[in-house]
Amino acid sequence: MKENIKSVVVLTAICLVVAVLLAYTNSITAPIIEANKAAKASGSLLEVMPEATGFENITETLGELPATVKEVHKETSGLGHVMILGTTTQFSSDEMGITVAIGADGKISNVLLTGYYESKDFGADYPATYIGQDSALGGVDTVAGTTFSSTAFKDAITDAFNVLISNNLVAAGQKSEEQLIAETMPLVLPGCVNSLGNPITVPVEGVAAPITQAFKAKNNCGYIYVVSTDAGTVVVGVNAFGVARALDLEGNDVTATATDAVAAAVAAAPATATENLEANTTTVTSFFEEGAVITPVEGLNVFSDVQAAFTVTVGEETKYAIITGPLAYADETMKMMVVFNANGEVVDYRAFTELILHGEYYANHELTDEAAYKAQFIGLTEGTYSDDMTLVAGATMTANAVASNFRSAFEAFNLIKEVVA
Amino acid sequence: MKKLGILFKGIIKENPVLVLLLGTCPALATTTGVISALAMGVAATAVLICSNIVISALRKAIPDKVRIPAYIVVIAGFVSVVQMLMQAYFPDLYDMLGVYLALIVVNCIILGRAEMFARKNGIIDSALDGIGMGLGFTLALVLMGSIREIIGAGSWAGIELTALKPYAVSIMTAAPGGFLVFGCLIALVNKFFSGKKAKKEFACEGCPNAAACNKETCETEAKEETK
């Protein structure tokens, strides 16, 4: 017993002495270690803002930040802010590291790419094109061939500016009209926008006043017109059914007020739209038995990637065929058709391109049984369908296009049913 | 003379790495370069000297029952102190050694010397044993680090050896290279400096678990193996 007590006492005493020794050492080294850490952290910050006298990490004080903004450091003498950003392209999950210095004048004073893991480089000079830019980023663009990487880079920089602007740390830059038009276009016709948020369109030549610019959606879901009015520039989207909606450059819906602009846009659209409708009618006709009455749906108020919609009457039964053109890999249009019965169940699903799962882009990689893949959607309704069902590992872009197709088709079907009702 | 013997036996005759085969893990992990090998050697030596001194000083006060936990607490305390000092004053070395610095706590050399030497000898002798064993450990690590860095990276302590650089065999800085060099050095030391005596001494008596296990059986087996 006595020996046990002695053991406990000795061991406790040793622990206490060691604890005191550690506490003393920690009291001496802790400030030095902290200073080392701060110096190490500010070392990378100094690379982009060499004239800085010190930095204060204000990340925690800025509320919820976008996922791309990792750290925000304020230069203590008021030169500006250095932000550490991390973003991913849609090809790789490895983070692209960016350190950007934004001066007190709201302009980028330096930017550094600290991590880049994509196989294709967007060029060593690309980040430098951002130097001197304000939040409008008017003088920079994405790089053809590395669109995903350069878009991710640009979006991360935009996020950085948004954080500073929303916290009143810098003033917003003035965007040019061209930029504002480019930002409004995806809003008026979202169906022509690819996975990066860029409208995929073809310019239409020979436009007449008041229309100043015209674009045809590459996936035939409509047109976009830039119209000059007395109240300013208006961007009008006309869908494949001839329905228009208009937004001003501040993003306000002016469909009801900018009637002249809307009328001009609608008047400019029909010729090609009719041509596209005829082609789709032929396509749909080939899938139904002879004697089926196929009637195009008109005036459908959808701005997704729907190209056309038809009611198909076969005997007593009425079906609804929706043709969509979602954008997939390399902004290719994947034309598809979903046929619903009157109850909103999918009774047929077709893809008119060979791109789906083992075609042009997957020639050497048969990812899944295409027939079985398509068959899984038969019988589904909006309530039982889920985007998760479209997923195919290794064919993400195609799967996204299939998901977009079904979302658009269900939306169109619901609107048709409303009109019928 | 006896004191000099204590000091020098750890360098070759009872070299902890190449003869006693202790501390193999850090010896392989931190010898990719001379600098990290030297840093690990110095850190382990500092802990070894301090722990030997303290354990020797407390040898009469620490009850036999709790001696291993007590040694571990003392060793862990010194390792933590070394860690904090290195992090504060040699941050680059601290980053270089990584987890292996903290793992000095479980380095067999340190606990082995505490159990085998420090608890039976005076403070001066224990300190000399710590210095000797530490020097032996450091020298072995630096030797391994030199061979691996020169052959594997064409440099020594970060100094580029221009003539060797193009012929660098990078596997030498990887784990297989570590085992290869380690094996060759053990073979050389055994060839030229017999370590038999040290092995025998360490076989059972020096084992920290000797008291807990069946010592007689262990010794019998050891004798049979020797035959």
Image (spheres, helix red, strand yellow):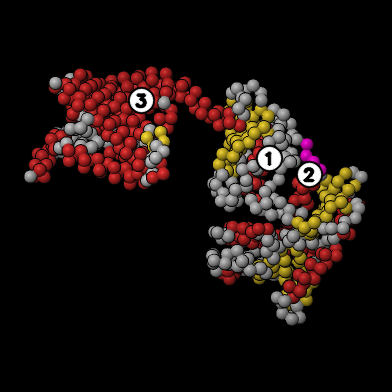
Which residue is labeled 3 in the image? Answer: B82
- What's the mark number on residue A238? none
Q: Nearer the viewer, residue A119 or B154?
A: B154
The three-letter code of the residue at mark 1 reads Thr
Range shown magenta = A174-180
**Any part of residue B168 in sight:** yes
Q: Nearer the viewer, residue A319 or A263?
A: A263
**Residue B181 occupies which quadrant of the picture?**
top left
Which residue is labeled 2 in the image? Answer: A180
**Residue B227 occupies which quadrant of the picture?**
top left
Q: Position of residue B169 (x, y in %)?
A: 37, 46
Report the residue at 25% width, 43% height from top: B184
Q: Secondary structure at mark 2?
A: helix
Q: Nearer the viewer, residue A162 or B45?
A: B45
- Mark 1 and mark 2: Cα distance apart in space: 20 Å
Q: Nearer the viewer, mark 3 or mark 1?
A: 1
**Residue A56 occupies which quadrant of the picture?**
top right
Q: Nearer the viewer, residue B123 or B161?
A: B161
- Mark 3 and mark 1: Cα distance apart in space: 48 Å
Chain containing the residue with disc 3:
B
- What's the mark number on residue A129? 1
Q: Position of residue B85 (x, y in %)?
A: 39, 23
